[in-house]
Amino acid sequence: MSDLTPARNWTPLNARERRVLGVLIEKQKTTPDAYPMTVVAIVTGSNQKSNRDPVTQYEIEDVEDTLEALRRKGAAVLVEGSGRVPKWKHSAYEWFGLKGRPVETAILAELLLRGAQTEGELRQRASRMDDIPDLTALQTSLAYLNELGLVHYLSPPGQKRGVVVCHGVYQADELERIRNATTRQLQDQASEAMSPSGRSGGTSGAHEELAALKLEFAALQAQFAQLAADVEALKNALGS
């Protein structure tokens, strides 16, 4: 990891904290005239049906408690707007160590709002917050976020299509479940592609075995890449 990589200040967040922080970042970028946000606006943004996964039904009390938790962690700040109406803003740039990196912050916000996605989906969705001209630009930003432990590759990076990524702000047990679920999904897709109904011709048993070995090797590559990223993040956190 580069000596210029910022020290880690952030901590894992629960589902509500991730959603609320993602909303604050998103709205700051897409509707700056309505930012900072009231609690009611944050509730509406958290529960909206577009660009959210899963769709939630948070109450005002839920969001108020979540905002206080984010404030204590240093990720959100309480301010006052016109008429002294309490409003909130995020401090994600400093908290995540992404000061001066608006594109990376937009990418992270999109992952906080929707969870794991392919690179293609992520570029399309995050571009509504900050321009991401092409897939190469996205991949450069993802590599930087991966260095910080803020993004994890759930399938081997560098492939032409289908690379799946998620944010690294999950609790440890959540992240493990997501990794396992993604691995099973990729295995199911490969099995379906190799089934008689999914093949265009009479693929031999040797070809099927080779495809299975390639899948297993790809999964091992992803695990190794993530392990290396986790070790680097730990070394950075320990100051070594």
Image: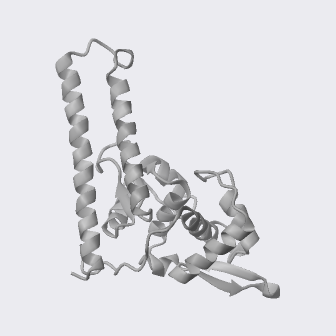
Residue at horizontal 21 percent and vertical 35 percent from the top: 214
Foreground of the two, 26 or 84: 84
- Placement of 82 over or under 205, stated as above or below: below
- Placement of 212 over or under 58, stated as above or below: above
Q: Position of residue 203 (x, y in %)?
A: 25, 16
In the displayed structure, does residue 164 sit left or right of residue 204?
right
| Way the structure is coloured | one colour
Snapshot quadrant of residue 76: bottom right
Snapshot quadrant of residue 104: bottom left
Q: Position of residue 68 (x, y in %)?
A: 62, 79
Residue at horizontal 49 percent and vertical 68 percent from the top: 13
Residue at horizontal 29 percent and vertical 71 percent from the top: 233
Res 90 seen here: no
Foreground of the two, 158 or 15: 15
Res 216 seen here: yes
Count of labels shown? 0
In the displayed structure, does residue 210 sit left or right of residue 202?
left
Residue at horizontal 68 percent and vertical 75 percent from the top: 35
Q: Residue at the far right: name it.
A: 83
Q: Residue at the far top: name it.
A: 202
Snapshot quadrant of residue 5: bottom left
Q: Residue at the far front: name it.
A: 173
Q: Position of residue 162 (x, y in %)?
A: 38, 42
- Placement of 31 over or under 78, stated as above or below: above
Q: Position of residue 47 (x, y in %)?
A: 69, 57
The quarter of the rendered structure image containing the C terminus is bottom left
Foreground of the two, 103 or 217: 217
The quarter of the rendered structure image containing the N terminus is bottom left
